[in-house]
Image (cartoon, rainbow, N blue to C red):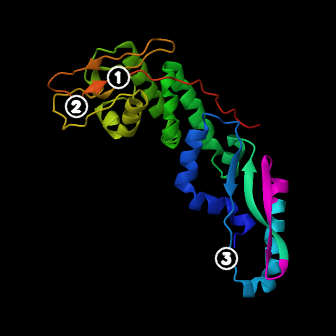
Amino acid sequence: MTHPFETPGQMRTRMDKGAKTAIGGQMMSPDAPITKRISQPRIESSELAARIPEIRAWLQAWKDEEARTEGLTLATTKKSSAGLRFSVPSSITFASLEDYVAWIGSTQDYQVAGRRIGELTDLDARLFGMTRIWQGLAALSEPDFLSFLELLRWRRDNPDSHPPVRALAIPGLDTKWIEGHQMLVKAVAQVLAVWPRWRRSSPCAPATQRLPRLQAPGAPSSSRTRRASRCSSWALGTSPSSGRAVRRPQPSG
């Protein structure tokens, strides 16, 4: 049976991947309510009478959780079995995404990710799609994120240039950095509707060839297909994709 004081930890374990993936999708509508079902215990009819006090304590514990948690609303369901009538907690609803992430203990990562996604969309509105890897963005150190941001600015301003990474005047950035952050580079390619064809890299391929084109907010999308040289690692093409403005989470307090 669910114990109310263990609920945050249980949801973090039981819904770890699902909940955190859902957060990325919910960032598009952060003010929409979020409802989560409460796991129901299985109780045999023959045991029900003996466990009614336990069920009542379970319900009361959830009511206490509702009373002390801002933005949380409890829903209950009336049941009847073996001649007994009783109510059980059935679901909880959070008023907003901010209330939800606070309850599962992810506020700090959510705020960091929100700020960084806002900075990315300042470069290209389509980069709002990076919300799906919000945890990866939040996990970057500040120097690493600033290097990534500078790399994308350079790519936006130099769409046809493919020098070796070591030739770029970006502090902390080198070929190993890009090789170690392929998740970010690939995510950028995907959200910009650039479909990379993974090939074995030729030793002479500059790592900057792996970056797709960016466009400033309001600029028309490109539909050209880019063919790199025989040393290329990806064959890149772009297609139009719409962007969305981001509402950045505000630090609490």
Whether residue 125 is situated above or below residue 199 in the rendered picture = above
Q: Is 92 on the left-hand or right-hand side of 178?
A: right
Q: Residue at x 29, y 28 (%)?
A: 210
- Residue 165 visible here: no
Of mark 2 and mark 1, the one earlier in the sequence is 2
- Which mark, by number, is residue 123? none
Estimate the spatial distance between the alpha carbons at disc 1 and disc 3, rounded to whole Å. Answer: 53 Å
Amino acid on which the number 1 mark rests in the picture: Thr
- Image quadrant for the N terminus? bottom right
Amino acid on which the number 3 mark rests in the picture: Arg
Whether residue 10 is situated above or below residue 132 in the rendered picture = below
* Dot 1 and dot 3 residues touching (CB under 8 Å): no
* Dot 3 and dot 2 residues touching (CB under 8 Å): no
Disc 3 is placed on an element classified as: loop
Front disc: 3 or 2: 3
Where is mark 1, residue-wise?
A: 238
Whether residue 183 is situated above or below residue 167 in the rendered picture = below
Estimate the spatial distance between the alpha carbons at disc 2 and disc 1, rounded to whole Å. Answer: 16 Å
Amino acid on which the number 2 mark rests in the picture: Ser
Whether residue 141 is situated above or below residue 35 in the rendered picture = above
Q: Is residue 144 magenta?
A: no
- Which mark, by number, is residue 233? 2
| Stretch of the chain drawn in magenta | 65-84
Where is mark 3, residue-wise?
A: 42
